[in-house]
Amino acid sequence: AQRVTQPEKLLSVFKGAPVELKCNYSYSGSPELFWYVQYSRQRLQLLLRHISRESIKGFTADLNKGETSFHLKKPFAQEEDSAMYYCALRQGGSEKLVFGKGTKLTVNP
Amino acid sequence: DTEVTQTPKHLVMGMTNKKSLKCEQHMGHRAMYWYKQKAKKPPELMFVYSYEKLSINESVPSRFSPECPNSSLLNLHLHALQPEDSALYLCASSQEIWTGFGRGNTIYFGEGSWLTVV
C-alpha cells in the first residue's frame, strides 16, 4: 500500500531563511507526487506536481526515486508562506490521492 | 471559473436529523470527490464519481449517501450521524479520473463544509 510521510509536524523559520519541507513516500510502482498548501481559512490548493517540474511562488520540489523523496524547498522564505503543507501521492491507474499528515510552516518576521 | 463551491459552510445537526451537503463546479470536470478531514489531520478520501457513476467507495458507512445528479453537482446525504462524524467535508473535482501516467490532472478543492453532530 502507498504511504506518504511528512516527518515534521511543525517547522518554524525566519523570513529570508531557506526552508525545506520533507516528504518521503513508499510505493512500489511509479507514483505521481504533489504538494498542496492550505493557508489560514482558505481552501486546499495545488502548489506543485512533480511531472510539471515548475516553480510556484519560489517553491520547487524534485522527485528522487532513489531516496523515495519529494522534498519542497524555497531559498528565501516569506511571511506569507506560513501555511499548512501537505504532500500527496497518487498511484498510477488510481483516482485515489493519499495525503501525508502535513507540516505547519511558520515564517517569523 | 476555477472554483468548487460547497454549501452550507457550516452545519449543526442532531443524530436523528437528515441533512445534505452540496457541491457544484462549472469547469466541465467529469470526476468529483468527497473527502473528510478531521481537525489537524489530512483529508481522507470517501467517494469518487466518474461521469456521474460511483467509482470508489472507501468503505464509508451507509449513513453517508452520495449522489451525483448531473456532471456539475455532487451531494452528500447525511442520516443518523454520530458525534465522531463531526469534521470538515471537502468536495473536489478534476477534469477526469486518471487516464495515464503523466497526465497529472489537477484536483481542485472546495472550501469545505464544517459539520458538527450533536
Image: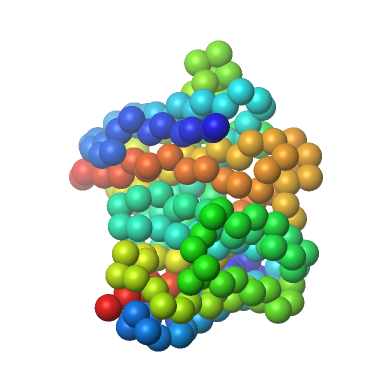
Q: At x 30% / y 33%, what residue is drawn?
A: A8
Residue plotted at (34% across, 80% down): B15
Q: Which quadrant holds the C terminus of chain B? A: bottom left
Query: What residue is rendered at 55% in x and 63% in y?
Result: B34
In which quarter of the view is residue A92 placed? top right
Q: Quadrant of residue B11?
A: bottom left
Q: How is the image coloured?
A: rainbow
**Camera-nearest residue between B36 and A34:** B36
- Residue B7 x %, y %: 49, 80
Residue at the far left: name it.
Answer: A109
Q: Is residue B49 above or below residue A23?
A: below
Q: Residue B92 or B83: which is nearer the viewer?
A: B83
Residue closest to the far top:
A66
Task: Look at the image and tell me whether residue A70 can be seen.
Answer: no
Asked whether, in this view, residue B110 is left or right of residue A78, the answer is: right
What residue is drawn where x is 74% and y is 72%?
B71
How many marks the image carries: the answer is 0
Q: Position of residue A31 (x, y in %)?
A: 63, 31
Q: Nearer the viewer, residue A64 or B48?
A: B48
Question: Taking A105 as reference, is B62 above or below it?
Answer: below
Instruction: Answer above or below: position of B111 versus A71.
Output: below
At which x and y percent is residue B35?
A: 50, 59
Q: Can residue A101 be seen from the camera position used here?
A: yes
Quadrant of the snapshot with the N terminus of chain B: bottom right
Is residue A40 shown left or right of residue A24? left
